Image: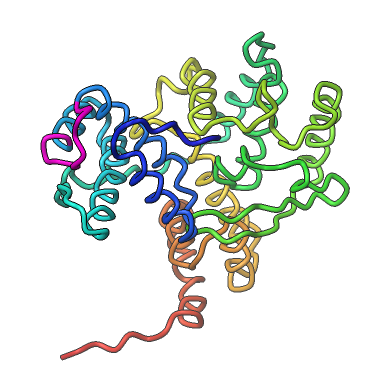
Amino acid sequence: MADPVYRSKFRADIEAFIIQKRAAGYPYNTSARVLGYLDAMISKSFPDSDILSKEICNAWIDKCSSFHQNTLLRRVTPVRQLAKYLVGTGKEAYIIPGGIPNKQIHYDAHIFTETELKAFFSSIDKCRKSSFSPYRCYVIPVIFRLLYTCGLRASEARLLNVDDVDLDTGKIFIRGSKGWEARIIYVSPDMLDLLHRYDCIIQRYLPARKVFFPNQKGDFYSKSTLDIWFHEFWDTLPEAAVTKGNKPRVHDFRHSYCVYRLNQWVSDNADLNALYPYLSEFVGHSNFADTDYYLTLAEPFYSEFEARMRKVNAAILPEVPHED
């Protein structure tokens, strides 16, 4: 997706800042769009300003104040970073203080029950064709199953290229992005069969496509599209009405995959010492601490997990000396 066209007097600075971020290895696509919204506000309300002032920053915060806390944080952070960049280049700029807004709200993962999963997948299998999105009826049943059966992040699935998916071996190349290293995973035989059938259908419409899950233009779907699809099918289910706690999200398919996999290993009396590192690698965690989070979610087996993992942690984690 192309960057926005910046039109304010900050255009050159914003473009240079984004180039610097990407040169450091950050995709900076979402933040680039946020800065596009900021630029549009400045062009409209502060067309003559050439200093990122406190007045502009306060106007931006006020403009975004109706958003959810986490969305507000994502709207403010790039502006703060831009200001720091400007100051670093010797220009005057107001840096929004830390703590504005407050810290991101923590979400407890929702682990889908088997009943919820069956209801959701049954619902998306009834997805109909749309003149606005002609391929979505084929994409939706497959991409959500891929998310769940492989524990992928939404971006990892939607940004797959055709060349990333080997339909002969079931090997999928997951590209690296911010903070994540590239990796290779293998899908189950059932999932591979589904990918085969899906690919045959899409090939009839787009024989020379490059994107594995193409939108109506043959390009990648946006991040928000998967969220919209999820709520379109989930929110109308009877199971959704009785769900307690935080509302389920697309990312919870990943959480559910990890917990179900761990539970299955415990149920099978498998060697967690040998398998645990593979799960961490498979889902793309950079360290075991990220994977450890799922141990706390596997409530039926937590005590057994704790006992089994004690030896694993002792082997892989260094002893920390205590100071008197």
In-front residue for pair 248/46: 46
Determine the residue positioned at 51% across, 65% down: 286
Residue at horizontal 59%, vertical 73%? Answer: 273
Q: Is residue 165 magenta?
A: no
151 left or right, relative to 242? right
Give yes or no for residue 48 being in the magenta stretch: yes
Residues drawn in magenta = 46-56
Report the quarter where the C terminus lies: bottom left
In the picture provided, is 86 more to the left or to the right than 132?
left
Q: Nearer the viewer, residue 25 or 306?
A: 25
Residue at the far left in the pictured view: 55
- 134 or 239: nearer the viewer: 134
> Which quadrant: the N terminus?
top right
Question: Could you tell me residue 159's position as x and y percent?
Answer: 62, 41
Query: Image check: 186 left or right of 230?
Result: right
Q: Is residue 75 above or below residue 321?
A: above
Q: Residue at x 25, y 60 (%)?
A: 88
